[in-house]
Amino acid sequence: MSNEPITLTAGDAEATVLPGNGGRIGGLRVGGTELLRQGERYGCFPMVPWCGRIRDGRFDDGAVVHQMPLNSPPHAIHGTARDAAWRTARVTADEAVLTYDLTDPWPYTGRVTQVVALAEDALTLTLAVETYDSSFPAQVGWHPWFNRTLDGGGGADVSIAFDPAWQEERGDDHLPTGNRVEPKPGPWDDCFGMPDGVDVTLTWPGRLELNVTSREPWAVVYDEQEAAVCVEPQTGPPNGLNTAPRLVTPLEPLEATTTWSWRRL
């Protein structure tokens, strides 16, 4: 199938999926109100086969060191799939299935599948990385840009509420130092640990409450930008290919899911 934009609908919720632009969610509207920042780089993109930054763009797989392009010098950031065209495998009124085949500069072969499922009160995103050849370390996650205010800035700023078990201490290079510290107040561009699963609530006062959940224990929260805030569930911390890799094998794919559920206030 083509990689043309896809519109999913469920009740008064509408999601736009952009296979040709990194498999991202280009928009999510509830009752006609857009929740995601608009623009070619924004919306919500899948991070795969790694999340956040890799230190100096290098990661080890046993005795082999691999170098990724430094797309955020001096580091490599957010994987390769957000810069690629995905294929549309299947579409219904409220669900789309996309695929992306890993290729250069990633040194291993594999297939990524993303399922986007819309309900009247929730959007569920699922990623799976499979290999039929060599095993390799990987991460998956999502990078949504939620509008700080709704309806073009006329309302109150969104608030972010969550209760992490720890915060990854951030070095001057924006990467975790390896130390876990007590969670600190924002503003944040930080990774947090939630061993019982990601659970973060965004509230636009008087308008909407949106809950970001995942069984995964990691989330990066970023609120240093004027236009948007980010809550990024992922399977490991930044630089995790080196510090906390998950292994994709022919018998065991890497899978993760996040759900955004909302209610009007």
Image (tube, rainbow, N blue to C red):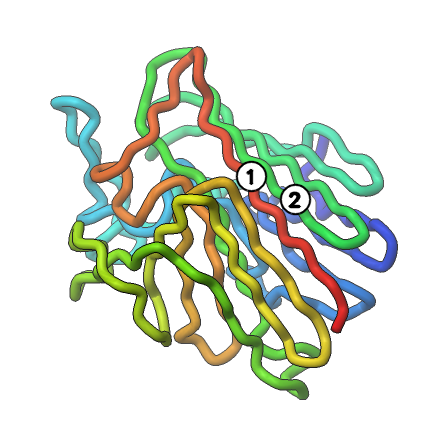
Residue type marked 1: Thr
For this view, does 201 lie left or right of residue 72?
right
Q: Quadrant of residue 165?
A: bottom left
Q: Quadrant of residue 241?
A: top left
The reply to whether callout 2 and callout 1 are in contact (CB within 8 Å) is: yes
Q: Is residue 167 above or below residue 70?
A: below
Of 170 and 78, the residue lying toward us:
170
What crowding class fits label 1: few (fewer than 14 Cα within 10 Å), some (14-19), or many (20 or more)?
Answer: many
Residue at 65% across / 44% down in the picture? 124
Numbered circle sitting on residue 84: none
Q: Is residue 18 above or below residue 241?
A: below
- Residue 70 visible from this viewpoint: yes
Residue at 54% across / 35% down in the picture? 127
Outermost left residue: 63
For this view, does 27 lie left or right of residue 101?
right
For this view, does 44 lie left or right of residue 166?
right
Quarter of the image that includes the N terminus? top right
Q: Secondary structure at mark 1?
A: strand
Q: What's the CA distance linking mark 2 and mark 1? A: 7 Å
Of 143 and 24, the residue lying toward us:
143
Residue 225: image location, x then y, percent: 44, 75
Residue 43: image location, x then y, percent: 58, 59
Numbered circle sitting on residue 257: 1
What crowding class fits label 2: few (fewer than 14 Cα within 10 Å), some (14-19), or many (20 or more)?
Answer: some
Residue 111: image location, x then y, percent: 50, 24
Quarter of the image that includes the C terminus? bottom right
Residue at 74% across / 30% down in the picture? 90
Residue type marked 2: Thr
Q: Secondary structure at mark 2?
A: strand
Q: Quadrant of residue 261?
A: bottom right
In the picture of the structure, the residue carrying the numbered disc 2 is 124
